[in-house]
């Protein structure tokens, strides 16, 4: 595995000094579209969602465009998904003082992302949920949406056999001692292998058994986690995880003054190292393959892995809360 290119999606957006939380979707053989939120800072009313289109053959991004603007809300995480002839993007919007008071929306495109329908609200049985990782398409054409409750710090994934009609069924709740959110997942042998962002100091794994209809007890995979989003993908028998392999050492904690959770002492650790880990044994053991970034007191966070083909992936991520960086990796 090696880096064959590393750069930025854009150079600078003067009116949007802060950018964060990118998502990616390969919409055809030659194009990937990125979505992220940008503004003065996360949570402010001037935060919009932007997008950019990437030409795989030319290795070139177009100029970022305004995707969603809502002057009444601060906008947040996105989750793009392709199904049938529809390209849909779900997104989060802040309704109150923080993400525990939020709403979910979606918009559709029928021409590969060149035009979009008017956004519509999206809810799941009245629950106040968020999302931050990819929607997984299963081999049987069902979809799993990894939702979570940021007030309780509990993952609550949903499954659908009719995404067009927004019919979703809850797959249970996933809990760790101190809380978890933003799980990412892949399908392995008709089971769902999932990794969890946690406040327990490490990445945890859990496996969903469709016959038993339950998640296994989450356990640590011994990769430190500073309470930061990770990304997980699978190519053949190879599992790939991009994450911040840093723990929650007391001297490195950043306490959250906004108190975004009912759990006491909201905090996260440093995000100044970003690495790629791989596993060849279905997630039982992992080793660090590539260090993408390692610069003390900077932030490199919220990675998103997009498979380009069987030999290449793209990883996009937040670069110092100012830009969106990306790397092309040869497997």
Image (spheres, rainbow, N blue to C red):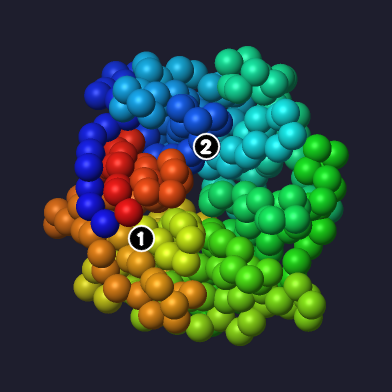
Please name the residue shown 23% across and 52% down the image.
Answer: 2
Left/right placement of residue 202 relative to residue 211 reads left
Question: Exactly how many numbered labels are in the figure?
Answer: 2
Please name the residue shown 45% across and 17% down the image.
Answer: 65
Q: Are marks 1 and 2 in contact (CB under 8 Å)?
A: no
Please name the residue shown 69% across and 21% down the image.
Answer: 110
Quarter of the image where one finds residue 318 = top left
Please name the residue shown 64% across and 44% down the image.
Answer: 102
User: Which of disc 2 and disc 1 is earlier in sequence?
Assistant: 2
Left/right placement of residue 242 relative to residue 187 reads left
Camera-nearest residue between 62 and 278: 278
Camera-nearest residue between 275 and 121: 275
Quadrant where the image shows the C terminus:
bottom left
Q: Secondary structure at mark 2?
A: strand
Mark 2 lies on residue: 25
Q: Secondary structure at mark 1?
A: strand
Mark 1 lies on residue: 243
Image x and y of residue 296, in percent: 14, 57
Quarter of the image where one finds residue 71 = top right
Number of other residues with Cα within 10 Å of mark 2, as a class: few under 14, some 14 to 19, many 20 or more: many
Q: Which mark is residue 172?
A: none
Left/right placement of residue 209 relative to residue 319 reads right
Image x and y of residue 305, in percent: 43, 49
In this view, the residue farthest toward the left is 296
């Amino acid at each position: 595995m090696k880096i064959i290119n590393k750069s930025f999606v854009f150079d600078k957006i003067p009116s949007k000094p802060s950018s964060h939380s990118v998502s990616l979707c390969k919409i055809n053989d030659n194009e990937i579209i990125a979505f992220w939120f940008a503004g003065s800072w996360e949570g402010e009313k001037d935060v919009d969602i932007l997008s950019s289109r990437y030409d795989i053959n030319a290795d070139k991004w177009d100029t970022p465009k305004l995707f969603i603007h809502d002057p009444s809300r601060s906008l947040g995480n996105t989750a793009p998904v392709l199904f049938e002839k529809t390209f849909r993007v779900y997104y989060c919007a802040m309704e109150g003082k923080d993400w525990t008071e939020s709403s979910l929306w979606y918009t559709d495109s029928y021409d590969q992302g060149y035009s979009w329908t008017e956004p519509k609200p999206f809810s799941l049985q009245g629950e106040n949920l968020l999302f931050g990782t990819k929607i997984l398409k299963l081999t049987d054409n069902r979809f799993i949406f990894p939702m979570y409750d940021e007030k309780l710090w509990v993952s609550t994934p949903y499954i659908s056999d009719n995404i067009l009609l927004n019919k979703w069924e809850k797959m249970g709740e996933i809990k760790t001692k101190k809380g978890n959110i933003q799980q990412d997942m892949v399908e392995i042998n008709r089971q769902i292998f999932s990794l969890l962002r946690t406040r327990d100091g490490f990445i945890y794994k859990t496996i969903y058994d469709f016959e038993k209809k339950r998640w296994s007890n989450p356990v640590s995979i011994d990769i430190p986690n500073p309470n930061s989003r990770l990304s997980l993908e699978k190519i053949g028998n190879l599992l790939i995880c991009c994450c911040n392999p840093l723990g929650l050492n007391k001297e490195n904690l950043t306490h959250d003054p906004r108190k975004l959770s009912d759990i006491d002492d909201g905090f996260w650790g440093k995000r100044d190292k970003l690495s790629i880990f791989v596993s060849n044994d279905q997630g039982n053991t992992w080793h660090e393959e590539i260090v993408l970034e390692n610069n003390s007191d900077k932030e490199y966070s919220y990675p998103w892995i997009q498979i380009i083909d069987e030999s290449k992936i793209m990883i996009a991520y937040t670069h110092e809360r100012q830009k969106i960086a990306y790397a092309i990796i040869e497997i």
